């Protein structure tokens, strides 16, 4: 069995196997296997020890699952998150994300600065708490039309921000 386990994973897998045999604990581990042609697959092994009549380990019963697709999806998600975080870190645009009810989900520091909220305190707040008069209703109506159509709708809007500046923005 260990012959197909990737050399870098063997010690860990053997330690888990030995612990399972001595403690009678279930075994759950993910690792790589080396295919006959040299390729790699990520797998998860789940097993339990079956004891004989004397209470000693007699066999291990379990299953090995191929989780290569899951590993690829996890890596793609990590890469996507890295690109998104890099974009948010280095952009100079005032970016915000809101849910359908107008609750702030994510903002860029420039957006928070415009709203006069310097040290966080904006996530989870509603537009109506951040914009005066009918401005929040106007923004929310536009955002809901985007949600409903599932297509970007660009609109130029002039708003008064808490930092005292009136800005024309695209949303």
Image: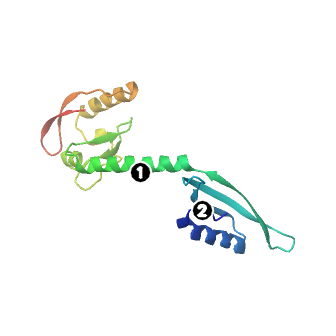
Tag of residue 78: 1
Kindly identify the residue that appears in the image at 18 percent across and 44 percent down.
162
Q: CA distance from mark 1 to mark 2?
A: 25 Å
Check the picture and name the quadrant holding the C terminus.
top left
Asked whether 116 or 69 is in front, the reply is 69
The answer to which quarter of the image holds residue 102 is top left
Asked whether 128 or 48 is in front, the reply is 48
Q: Nearer the viewer, mark 1 or mark 2?
A: 2
Q: Residue furthest right?
A: 53
The answer to which quarter of the image holds residue 26 is bottom right
Tag of residue 67: none
**Helix, strand or loop at mark 2:** loop
Q: Position of residue 69 (x, y in %)?
A: 54, 46
Asked whether 141 or 27 is in front, the reply is 27
Check the picture and name the quadrant holding the N terminus.
bottom right
**Helix, strand or loop at mark 1:** helix
Q: Position of residue 137 (x, y in %)?
A: 29, 31
Kindly identify the residue that appears in the image at 31 percent across and 32 percent down.
140
Q: Residue furthest left?
A: 165
Precedes in sequence: disc 1 or disc 2: 2
Q: Is residue 109 left or right of residue 73?
A: left
Work out whether 66 lies above or below 49: above
How many discs mark residues in the rendered view? 2
Q: Dot 2: few (<14), some (14–19), or many (≥20) neighbours within 10 Å?
A: many
Q: Dot 1: few (<14), some (14–19), or many (≥20) neighbours within 10 Å?
A: few
Q: Position of residue 110 (x, y in %)?
A: 21, 47
Q: Is residue 29 left or right of residue 152?
A: right
Tag of residue 5: 2
Asked whether 56 or 94 is in front, the reply is 56
Kindly identify the residue that appears in the image at 34 percent across and 28 percent down.
146
């Amino acid at each position: 069995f260990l012959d197909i386990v990737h050399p870098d994973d063997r010690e860990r897998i053997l330690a888990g196997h030995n612990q399972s045999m001595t403690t009678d604990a279930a075994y759950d581990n993910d690792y790589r296997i080396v295919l006959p042609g040299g390729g790699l697959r990520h797998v998860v092994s789940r097993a339990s020890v079956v004891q004989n009549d004397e209470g000693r380990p007699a066999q291990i019963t379990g299953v090995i699952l191929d989780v290569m697709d899951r590993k690829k999806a996890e890596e793609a998600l990590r890469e996507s998150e890295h690109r998104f975080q890099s974009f948010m870190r280095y952009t100079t645009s005032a970016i915000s994300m809101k849910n359908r009810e107008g609750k702030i989900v994510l903002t860029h520091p420039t957006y928070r600065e415009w709203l006069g909220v310097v040290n966080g305190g904006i996530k989870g707040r509603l537009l109506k708490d951040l914009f005066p008069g009918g401005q929040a209703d106007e923004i929310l109506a536009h955002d809901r039309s985007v949600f409903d159509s599932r297509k970007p709708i660009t609109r130029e809007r002039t708003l008064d921000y808490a930092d005292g500046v009136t800005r024309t923005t695209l949303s």
